[in-house]
Image (cartoon, rainbow, N blue to C red):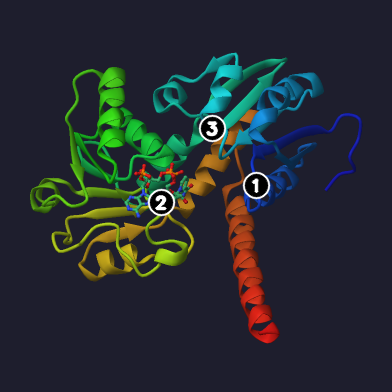
Amino acid sequence: MNEITGQTRVLGIIGYPLIYTLSPNMHNAALKEVALDYRYLPFVVAPEHLASAIAGIRALGIAGVNVTMPHKETVIEFLDEISPEARMIGAVNTIHNVDGHLKGYNTDATGFIRSLREELVDPEGRHAIILGVGGAARAVAVALINEGVASITLLGRTVEKVEAFKVHLLGSFGQFSIKTLSFDDDLADIFEVGDLVVNATPIGMKDSTDLLPVPLEHVDSRHFIYDLIYTPSETTLITAAKDKGAKAVNGLGMLLYQAATAFEIWTGTPAPIAIMRDALLIGLEGGDRSKHAQKKDKRFSS
Ligand code: NAP
């Protein structure tokens, strides 16, 4: 990589506590590949410092940042402009600084669609079932409606949140076919009509790796399953769906393409996808290796 000079521009990510992020790996590898004089750095920003951090982006001329938990929603009030999609989602994950004018985008939505189309299926005309109604589910739902799905069914465990999200979507899109259900309802009819299932819950990660977010007795080869989870790379949902003849992919592509879209917004240069994918995979392997090492260390010390 080039020396840091007086001309070097700064990109980064703001979040809290920001213990684990693959974004610096991906972006610095991409910047190096296309020989752009930028660096991408992590900035740990506590919620009470968000306003001054955003003022700092303007004051320091930081070219752009990604925004992660817990700031994706609260950052909106500090920005000058929000893309229509980010406004509908109610969350920003990318800020671009153009001469002090800060514009917020949501590249999770774009990243999801790019990955979905490339790896699984064209969403147009599909009947989508979205599991969960958190931040990622909101990006997925707005993106799918924008891409012309025929209907959406929202499945969540907290009835008030599910209904509030439905009202929000109807407010943004007017008349649109949206059903709501809870995980305990009979899902036979939903899986009869629905053909694109997106898991936007954390069920399948960490201490729930052996769990399914929904029973799969109604899933068959007509179904397309997109699991937003990417660690583990093959969740129990993906394995079980494939066993039933469905096509299923994980969320790695979404992670990659949300970063690629942010890179293109900031630099105006096509993202070197293959390099970013390699950096992502190396970062993930490194994470796994350090986790394995920690486990090993614990075993040795006990
Ligand atoms: P979030 O805002 O915390 O939302 C999680 C949703 O899952 C909420 O609706 C929550 O319900 C529901 N949920 C959590 N535990 C549940 C359980 N045991 N049973 C039923 N529902 C449960 O999280 P998020 O940011 O949307 O992320 C969701 C998932 O997507 C995570 O696994 C995350 O890693 C993944 N993700 C992937 C990408 C990517 O690039 N691939 C990007 C973003 C997120 P309540 O509202 O009732 O709590």
Q: Which residue in the protein does label 2 denote?
A: 228
Residue positioned 61% across, 46% down in the render: 272
- Residue 162, image x and y in percent? 27, 36
- Secondary element at image label 2: loop
Q: Nearer the viewer, residue 46 or 167?
A: 46
Q: Which residue in the protein does label 3 denote?
A: 72
Return the residue found at the far front.
Answer: 302
- The answer, for residue 234, to whether it is visible in the render is no
Q: Amino acid at mark 2?
A: Leu
Q: Is residue 171 left or right of residue 41?
A: left
Which comes sooner in the sequence, label 1 or label 2? 1
Residue positioned 50% across, 34% down in the render: 107
Indicate the quadrant where residue 87 lies.
top left
Q: Amino acid at mark 3?
A: Lys
Which comes sooner in the sequence, label 3 or label 2? 3
Q: Amino acid at mark 1?
A: Leu
Q: Is mark 3 within 8 Å of ligand 1?
A: no
